Amino acid sequence: MAIDKIAVNRKARHDYFILDTFECGIVLTGTEIKSVRAGRVNLKDSFAMIRNGELWLIGVHISPYEKGSYYNHEPERDRKLLVHRAEIVRLNSKVREKGLTLVPLSLYMKNGRHAKVELALAKGKAEHDKRDAIAEKDAKRAMARAIRRDGRD
């Protein structure tokens, strides 16, 4: 099972605590899938929401296909996500909890054919949590650097 990552939302892991992740399909038009395969996708500031019992991806920018005609797609239209109904019901109950949201972590091609979105159930971080995470990452980097330096002696 080959997976080709197209786009990664690096800011999501910085801004949110990731509680749960799952995979879902995405409905795309012909010119959209061609742009996705070319890697012209931006997941920054995007999110998912449940509307009328369906899961929708909002704010994802897929650039218009360069060789497309007047049938080209709108870059930031809402796109439907394909998930089992039981999963939507479960997510809807969790999202109603205070502070939880659905955030796309990555968009990738599975087996070179199907576009998939890795969606996360996430809780927003406060500013001090972000600072703590940065300080922890810096401390780990400093320890790794010290270990490498001691190993050379």
Image (tube, rainbow, N blue to C red):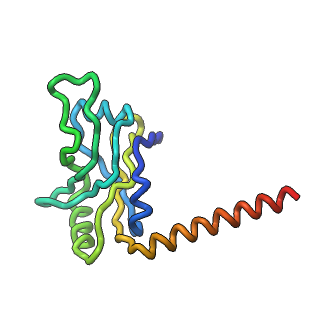
Left or right of 11, for residue 136: right
Q: Position of residue 20 (x, y in %)?
A: 39, 66
Q: Nearer the viewer, residue 86 or 131?
A: 131
Q: Nearer the viewer, residue 106 or 115?
A: 106
Identified at 25% across, 57% down, the residue is: 48
As drawn, the residue found furthest toward the left would be 52
Q: Nearer the viewer, residue 116 or 34?
A: 34
Total labels: the figure holds 0
Identified at 76% across, 63% down, the residue is: 147
* Quadrant of the frame with the C terminus: bottom right
As drawn, the residue found furthest toward the right would be 153
Q: Position of residue 133 (x, y in %)?
A: 51, 70
Which image quarter: residue 95? bottom left
Which image quarter: residue 125? bottom left
Left or right of 148, for residue 20: left
Rendered position, 144 above or below 131: above
Rendered position, 17 above or below 73: below
Q: Position of residue 119 (x, y in %)?
A: 34, 57
Identified at 23% across, 39% down, the residue is: 75
Q: Position of residue 128 (x, y in %)?
A: 44, 76
